[in-house]
Amino acid sequence: MSNFCPGNIPAHILEQTRKHPCYSVEVHHQFARMHLPVAPSCNIQCNYCNRKFDCVNESRPGVTSEVLTPALAFEKYHWVKEKIQELTVVGIAGPGDALADWQYTKQTIEQIKAVDSNIVFCLSTNGLLLPEYAPEIVALGIHHVTVTMNAIDPQIGAKLYKFVNYQGRRYEGVEAAEILYKNQLAGIQYLTDHQVLVKINIVMVKGINDQHIPEVVKKVKELGVFITNIMPLIPAPGSAFEYFPQTSMKEINDMRNLCQLDIQQMRHCKQCRADAIGLLNEDRSSEFRMCGQPQETSTQPAIPQRKYRIAVTSKYGKLVDQHFGHASEFIIFQGDGREFKLLERRSVHQYCSGMEECGEEEARRASTIRTIKDCQAVLTMRIGQHAKDKLAEQGTRSIEYCDSVENGLQHAVKVLLEEAAAIRKGEKTG
Ligand code: CLF
Ligand code: SF4
């Protein structure tokens, strides 16, 4: 059994921990952390979560103001580092699950690590994919990981989770809770065996897992975790637990006092946003937005409430700066012309290698085009006529553009509206 106490933590990890405001209460007024919101997807559905762009495990309900690509996250890190001298920790806390979008999480950490060997990295996860990625987490040199584990009894877990998506299948009920628990156990054990200081978050839901929490704490103690963080349920509008009572701080503190007998308790958690920045009790995230507000112009046609889904080709997510044929992914946005929400990123097989190839290339092109069949438009820097025609056949308008993604999305809706108006007037047939 692993068991961490200041006496047996290796010196280099102890040094990191002493700079970590969540793991070391005595420095939480002194050192700052920033969350980089690069992981928007989630692979489970907790009944207390209405996930817009927030994970209630690590964020107070609401939305993160932006989801960043690793490249933008890297820029943001430099910006914040320059302005906040006391920044010591970079965490990935969603807004979904840090491992569900592991490639973005990993890339973000690798980039920062390459230029700053003093930053402490931190991850927050539901643990479903820990068996898969724990070795990479260890190899990256991450020594602080938070796992949200609300139950060790699958019968209780079944009341907390609506579903678990795992290895291409969706599971529900006890089966879902069993898979999640089994993976959490294996993953936590691997991490603690490899000198990772694991923090366990537990959301206390009255009438569901409140009586069960001491058992959870005893179990994770056996696994050698460093600390537990028992947090109140904050009923999120639109979630399955929307009308459940909020757990009071008295109930939380009573439970922490009971569990303190087994393992040290975190008592200064702020349930911060997925894009939180600064000291724990002084969120400065609003000072550091990467994306400005969309511009409104009086020449814009009136925009109806209809939602448009638009695919964008972009190297780093900020500019429309990529040729359609060079895109390895589409960034999918949905919105009404004034406000857009990033829905997801869809990988495609890159078909334009810069050389003339036929046959296989044609099949790849067809598959690429089908990837965005549900989009009214694709916003791209350049596109060939053949691809344009094929996209038009499935009802996707190609719009060439070269400026920021935000301006481009507004431009695309403007084009779609003007064309629709022209069709209504009989000026255009499609
Ligand atoms: Fe962020 Fe979490 Fe790392 Fe801290 S937050 S990923 S461990 S750097 Fe801290 Fe915020 Fe509480 Fe999380 S106060 S919600 S415990
Ligand atoms: Fe929401 Fe986080 Fe649960 Fe995923 S793990 S459903 S983002 S609370």
Image (cartoon, rainbow, N blue to C red):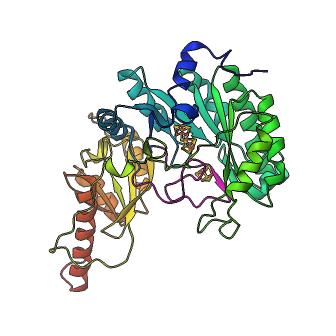
- Position of residue 220 relative to residue 15, above or below, is below
Residue 109 position within the rendered picture, expressed as x and y whole percent measured from the top left:
45, 30
x 31%, y 48%: residue: 290
Residue 183 position within the rendered picture, expressed as x and y whole percent measured from the top left:
73, 37
Q: Is residue 147 left or right of residue 347?
A: right
Residue 298 position within the rendered picture, expressed as x and y whole percent measured from the top left:
16, 74
Name the magenta segment's main secondary structure: loop
> Which quadrant would residue 34 be assigned to in this image?
top left
Residue that extends furthest to the left in the rendered view of this protein:
299
Magenta span: 39-66
Is 362 within the magenta? no
Q: Is residue 134 left or right of residue 343?
A: right
Pick the quarter of the image with the C terminus: bottom left
Q: Is residue 309 visible?
A: no
Q: Is residue 383 left or right of residue 36?
A: left
x 68%, y 29%: residue: 226
> Which quadrant would residue 232 be assigned to in this image?
bottom right
Residue 334 position within the rendered picture, expressed as x and y whole percent measured from the top left:
40, 63
Pick the quarter of the image with the N terminus: top right
Name the foreground residue: 117 vs 281.
281
- Position of residue 28 relative to residue 337, above or below, is above
Q: Is residue 168 visible?
A: yes
- Position of residue 165 relative to residue 225, above or below, is below
Name the foreground residue: 94 vs 428.
94
Q: Is residue 310 left or right of residue 159?
A: left
Name the foreground residue: 344 vs 42.
42
x 27%, y 53%: residue: 405
